[in-house]
Amino acid sequence: MEDHWQNLLELAQQFYEGWLRAPNIRFNLGFLRGSEIKQQFYCELLLHFKYSRGEVDLEQRQSTARRIVSKVLIEARRPVRYGWIRIPLIYPIKGVPVITSPDAILVNEDKVVAIVKASTSRFLRLSLGDEALARLQMYMLELLGFNTLETRYYIVKGSRDELVEALLYIKNNKVPPPKVKTHILAHDEQRAEELVSWALAYWTYKREPRPNPSPGKCRKCPYRSICPRAIT
Ligand code: SF4
């Protein structure tokens, strides 16, 4: 088995057996989910309120992560050489295990040709959180040993039928038609490290949570009555 698949399999095994944990991160979480890193870019203080007030079911979080990682244990044992795969990723970044599940990855031997994040949302703007998650997933594939030199990350938004059509375009190395709203990012290791380091600094106590207020966010935030930075 090639090194990149072996790496993924071994890390999943270690996580599943309880060996792969960060001993000293906030709230004793042990590992992070890609979605948690994405949320930090929306408003880190909101996320901090949620965890510090015990409003996240940590047992359920742990069992969900084990379920996700168990998929790696199945899929990575019989790796696909060419085509779309749907496999979660796990890698300890600066000692903090991160788990994330890309919607679809197009591989050609060791090369990651494309990663797709598909959404039926009509919200067209690319948020910083969307970018951070995309860069995190490309970065983790690189760290696992996949070839990401020409990887493109497609964030596609449209109806279900349009998204299926978009996958065919991407597989044929074409940009989806304009009716599908598409953002394309190339892998950029430096930018990925910058975003991921910023996120990890919070979890590893190197800095306090940063608020990211805006009238739209704060108006619907459940913590606006206790938040010193709320904009109303
Ligand atoms: S009220 Fe605004 S700044 Fe405060 S946590 Fe909520 S979204 Fe963030």
Image (tube, rainbow, N blue to C red):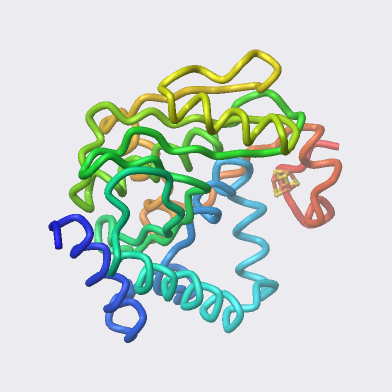
Eyeballing the image, is 185 above or below 129?
above
Eyeballing the image, is 167 above or below 181?
below
Locate the N terminus by quadrant: bottom left
Q: Between residues 82 and 217, which one lies in front from this camera angle?
A: 82
Residue located farthest toward the top when viewing the structure as drawn = 178
Q: Position of residue 5 (x, y in %)?
A: 22, 59
Q: Position of residue 167 (x, y in %)?
A: 54, 33
Name the quadrant containing residue 214.
Answer: top right
Locate the C terminus by quadrant: top right
The residue shown at (62%, 15%) is: 177
The residue shown at (62%, 51%) is: 45
In the image, 217: left or right of 105?
Answer: right
Q: Position of residue 119 (x, y in %)?
A: 67, 39
Name the quadrant containing residue 112.
Answer: top left
Q: Between residues 107 and 138, which one lies in front from this camera angle?
A: 107
The residue shown at (27%, 78%) is: 14
Q: Position of residue 198 (x, y in %)?
A: 39, 43
Eyeballing the image, is 218 above or below 63?
above
Name the quadrant containing residue 7.
Answer: bottom left
Eyeballing the image, is 210 above or below 127?
below
Q: Between residues 47 and 32, which one lies in front from this camera angle?
A: 32
In the image, 110: left or right of 17?
Answer: left
The residue shown at (60%, 59%) is: 48
Please give the count of numbered marks on the rendered protein: 0
Q: Between residues 77 and 12, which one lies in front from this camera angle?
A: 77
